[in-house]
Image: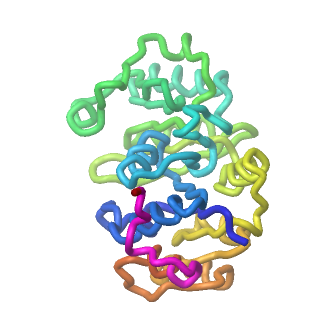
Amino acid sequence: MIKAIACDLDGTLLDSQSNIRPDSARALKTLQDHGFMVVLASGRSWRSVLRIQSLIGLTGPVITHNGAYGYDSLAHDAWYRRGIPKERAREFVAWADAHEVMVRLYLGQGQPVVYNRYDLAHQLCWLRPEDRIVTRLADTLDTDPLEVFLTGWEAIDQFIAQFGFRGPDYELLVFPHVGYREANIAAPGINKVEALNQLSRAWNIRPNEVLAIGDGPNDAAMLAWAGVSIAVGDGSPQLVPLADYITAAGSPEPVLEGLQWAFPYDLTTPVSTA
């Protein structure tokens, strides 16, 4: 019997423009109203996922930073985290300071996203009121950050030449953007199943009682782990052999389609609270 739904965001609950698919969101809210646990599981930051959770009207646990951080919005408590050791992060920040490179660190709910410096583009587009520039960040950091982002162009290559793509306590991916690149540094081997295992123990939910929905390569382990798996039809081909159901390619509401296959409820009409 299914007790929980773990749902990916980008490409799954969110469309290609990062908009919430409205009918799918209503279906998830309906299932929560029926007593199911609905867990948004994403590579996005905790604050992005919690914002989407709130917009949908959901409460409870979320999985963020690709499995490095679990937070319960109902209890206002972090139930899981695995970050980069602060000693290693300080080393990265010290290098960035010496090379006048911007870094930002995600520390978790209740703490600001911290920068060592910021450029004008990030000030205009990314900096939020709760974010902070911390002078002497390399000396004062006292929390294992969930993720470290390093921004630049040639600086990324210089950083990799200095530290490498991975070490015993971190791994690095490079993402290209318009006019700059960004190195994403996280704890090694992080994936959504790591957090799902912790959630399973904390809420006494077995893997075969979880339905998982996803579209990308970072969802493969989650779909293989869950008792029931739904793959988005125009997502990664590697999910196809892992899925119990594959939504139609190009479906405007793949989550709704998959949930209608799995559950005997009218998922288009919210549960009455009268």
Q: Is residue 265 above or below residue 158?
A: below
Q: Residue at x 41, y 21 (%)?
A: 116
Q: Quadrant of the N terminus?
A: bottom right
Task: Indicate whether residue 263 is drawn in magenta.
Answer: yes
In screen coordinates, is 147 left or right of 223? Answer: left
Q: Residue at x 50, y 33 (%)?
A: 106
Task: Report how many numbered discs are placed on residues in the image.
Answer: 0
Report the residue at 56% width, 28% height from top. 92
Front residue (pair 169, 217): 217
Percent position (x, y) of residue 120?
22, 31
Residue placed most toward the observer, 247 or 159: 247
Magenta stretch in the rendered image: 260-273
Which is nearer the eye, 1 or 141? 1
Q: In the rendered view, would you say 133 is above or below 22?
A: above
Q: In the image, 228: left or right of 74?
A: right
Q: Of all residues shown, which one is farthest toward the bottom?
A: 248
